[in-house]
Amino acid sequence: MAAPIAVAIDAPEIETAARWASAVAPHVSTVKVGLELYLRYGPEVITTVRGANKVDVFLDLKLHDIPATVGGAARNMARFKPSILTVHAAGGRDMVKAAVEAAPQTQIAAVTVLTSLDEKALDEIGLRGPASEAARRLAVLAVESGARALVCSPWEVASLRAEVGPDITLITPGVRPSGAERGDQARVATPEEAIEAGADLLVIGRPITRAADPGAAAASIAAALRRAQSTPSA
Ligand code: C5P
């Protein structure tokens, strides 16, 4: 079975994106397309990374607008059958609900608090902190509005799992195999730690896509996860 990994295909060009997607697709469940690629190429990039690969497409557009606009956008995106589409929980209950209703075959994943925002930045935009409490509030709001998935830091997985129960898909970026470069990610966990904490899908980008052999890097992380899952923890 493909590993529960969404490879962040953050390539500047569609040709590179297609190459990375084909290389990792045999090993992982999902590939993730973000704003950088989508705004340049539009829906073509979805069909391109999917290609002939049996892989789910996670569309990370982080929609945030009035409910009617987000509903319309989600309806448009639903035609391309992404398995996951992100929206900002901060858009409010009606906005999350509009996305959920507009794309019934797609899992709407709510982003709680961007991990790039520290306490000072949260204060400046008027979001009552601490960040973990803001994330908890927004997670509850999103789930009450029909979202079946949340995006959160690996450090918040255990507490959010306790808050929202077993049926909500928890998706975590900020995952780094031990020894890998952190890049600009501050609060990181290894793939095994994130799964152990209760994550369902790990977003991993540069440790795979910037490796000399992205297919081999994906296969190696997938194998490490399989080993961890077959060794019950004490
Ligand atoms: O290369 P790396 O593994 O850091 O890629 C992580 C991916 O997850 C990027 O596409 C980034 O935009 C996304 N992401 C993140 N932190 C969040 C939400 C999304 O790193 N809080």
Image (spheres, helix red, strand yellow):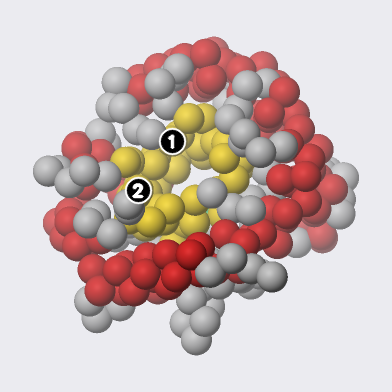
Residue 56 x/y as whole percent: 32, 41
Q: Quadrant of residue 215?
A: bottom left
Residue 60 x/y as whole percent: 44, 43
Mark 1 CB lies closer than 8 A to ligand 1: no
| Above or below 88: residue 133 | below
| Above or below 128: residue 102 | above
Residue 67 x/y as whole percent: 59, 17
Q: Kindly indicate whether the residue at mark 2 contacts the one at mark 1 (C-beta within 8 angstroms).
A: yes
Q: Residue furthest bottom?
A: 179
The Cα–Cα distance between marks 1 and 2, rounded to whole angstroms, is: 10 Å
Left or right of 141: which side holds 152? Answer: left
SS at circle 1: strand
Q: Which residue is mark 1?
A: 84
* Residue at 79% across, 40% down: 163
* Residue at 53% across, 20% down: 100
* Residue at 30% across, 69% down: 219
Q: Amino acid at mark 1?
A: Ile
Nearest the viewer among 97 and 124 is 97
Neighbourhood count class around disc 2 (C-alpha, 10 Å): few under 14, some 14–19, many 20 upward = many
* Residue at 34% across, 74% down: 220
| Above or below 117: residue 42 | above
Q: Amino acid at mark 2?
A: Thr
Neighbourhood count class around disc 1 (C-alpha, 10 Å): few under 14, some 14–19, many 20 upward = many
**Quadrant, the C terminus:** bottom right
Q: Earlier in the sequence, mark 1 or mark 2?
A: 2
Q: Which residue is mark 2?
A: 30
